[in-house]
Image (spheres, coloured by chain):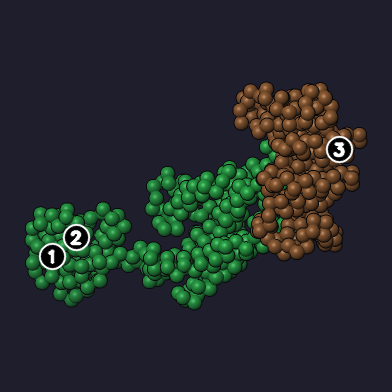
Amino acid sequence: MWKYLIEKEFKQFFRDPMLPRIVIVFPVIMMLVFPFAANMEVRNINLVVVDNDRTDVSAELIEKCTESGYFRLKKVCSDPREAQAMMDKNTVDAILTIEQGFSRSIVTGESFPVGIKVNTVNGTKGSIGSQYLSNCIMLFMQSRTDTPAVTQAQGETIEASPKYMYNPYMDYKVFMVPALIVIAVTMVTGFFPALNIVGEKEAGTIEQMNVSPISKTAFIVCKMIPYWVITFFMLGMCLLIAWLVFGYVCKGSLWGVVLFTVLHIMVTAGLGLLISNYSDNAQQAMFIMMFFVLIFMLMSGVFTPVSSMPEWAQIITYANPLRYYADAMRSIFLKGSSIADVWQDAAGLLAIGGGALTWAICSYRKTS
Amino acid sequence: MENAIEIHNLTKKFGDFTAVDNISFTVRKGEIFGFLGANGAGKTTAMRILCGLSIPTSGGGTVAGYDIVREPEKIKRHIGYMSQKFSLYPDLKVWENIRLFGGIYGLSDKEIASRTRDILSGLGMEDVRNSFVDSLPLGWKQKLSFSIAMIHNPRIVFLDEPTGGVDPETRRRFWELIYEATSGGVTVFVTTHYMDEAEYCDSVSIMVDGRIEALDSPAALKEKYGAENMDAVFRMLAGRAKRGE
């Protein structure tokens, strides 16, 4: 019985005018375009400096900041109101204020009068900009304290130098590659089968299946199988592109990637089925999916780290399967984590997947 | 087993709406049972209950000897069903549809091959074996649907408005198929809007507003209502309907 149903699903899949193409084009586009486009690196921050010190030292600091490449020096002025006016008009993103006595305080080691003010209308640009700016000042200070002119009397300076592990150059692309695989797998395994089942509802063919002795589990599982096969084909393609185009290889075991993909498929299959059970036509299904896709993506840590969300939002992410899958994929792919290291993610996926599948099978009825 | 279908006091409610209102009837083995009624009279709902697609609110009965409430999955092995909405897979070829449904009803590859030959030669459709079902004319699709509903030699076959939208000649040929099937002993339960088709049935029930208003052979019904044909009988009874479409 199963053989005939699986045969049917494969034939229908490959005869569909769109699906086979989407499955190939979608991951390729995602892998080739998104890592470049969805880039969180911030450059070209417009900077105005209010320099009330006007010494060689302050000039050196300004130079230090501009040569970092992140800032574009718009103006050096001495009136803070002028600088504020420029920020109000949105022509600058950050104001660096160097107060009088800056060069002297450097030598004496007093707390030095430097102020940073950033425009956070664009929050990311603002927060990253202020970090860059304080980094520049810190580097400058260090370089100054190293010069022999400074006496050691001020004692030890506290040194804090960040070291970026597993992604030493802060390359956003390598960070995005595992996340994009997560998105592609979610789309293909969750939404295609759901639309397929809703399609059979609309066509009325599902009724013909419901009057047959075929069990609901058989019908559903046979529907899913082709999408599972296709998912692994797609996963292979994504990993291949990551290697060929970006030169990234998975640091951990590929079996870990496969295992987590299987677990995630269980979750998306359950969710897809739930959606198809509760919607009567493709439009309804599409809208429900849009709703979940947005929440899942934005609250998964794929784009923004979960740890920087407010606490209540962090709690919500525990119900988001993408959180676990994305975390596991990144750990395995970038860090080379073993399955034992990310067992919490596996547990999370198992719990959500088990729940969703059980609910889906219970709510699918052959009879009304 | 004397009767193919025995139904007692069957009722189906959707909220406040009573789609099927306390109907009882029996269908003898091997007969053609015509299930008539205007749109919205509750025919399809009643038929879906008999096929195990819908659970009755109250009442019950047996189909092919199995209880419609407790054993719907057993019923499904022994019935064929052809729905009003044409329900073969349009993106599968003719032979692929036959193979799929043969497989679903547990036929082996060998049985499927021989059944496919029989069906295609019986319908004179050998030439379109490799055509997509989508490309066939409606009349052909309906005949193919019927043959596929019969692929596992069911005891009862349910036909929900099987001949909607085709010309009289095609309808006549479809009924030849039905007669052929009953000569093999199968019971046919058919809903239709065409009163000339009602004349072909052994028994006819007429549903009005969820109830069965009349149930007898066409000849007896015509005599009882003093009508010349089934069309007149139907108008007389269906004209009493209070429910709209």
- At horizontal 45% and vertical 58% (from top left) the residue drawn is A302
Where is residue A80, by image quadrant? bottom left
Q: Which residue is at the front of the view, B31 or B109?
A: B31
Residue B31, which numbered label?
3
* Gap between marks 2 and 1 measured at Cα: 9 Å
Residue to which mark 1 is pinned = A75
Secondary structure under the numbered disc 1 in the rendered image: strand
Q: Which residue is at the front of the view, A230 or A343?
A: A230
- In the rendered view, tell whether residue A194 sits above or below residue B11: below
The colour one sees for chain B in the rendered image is: brown
Where is residue A117, by image quadrant? bottom left
- At horizontal 60% and vertical 53% (from top left) the residue drawn is A196
Quadrant for the C terminus of chain A, please: top right
Is label 2 in contact with label 1 (beta carbons under 8 Å)?
yes
- At horizontal 57% and vertical 62% (from top left) the residue drawn is A17
Residue to which mark 2 is pinned = A92
- In the rendered view, tell whether residue A236 sits above or below residue B139: below
Q: Relative to residue A203, is residue B194 drawn left or right?
A: right
- In the rendered view, tell whether residue A366 sits above or below residue B204: below
Q: Position of residue B99 (x, y in %)?
A: 77, 59
* Gap between marks 3 and 2 measured at Cα: 89 Å
Chain for numbered disc 2? A
Chain for numbered disc 3? B
Residue B198: in sight, yes or no?
yes
Q: Relative to residue A274, is residue A213 drawn left or right?
A: right
- In the rendered view, tell whether residue A33 sits above or below residue B20: below
The colour one sees for chain A in the rendered image is: green
* Amino acid at dot 1: Lys
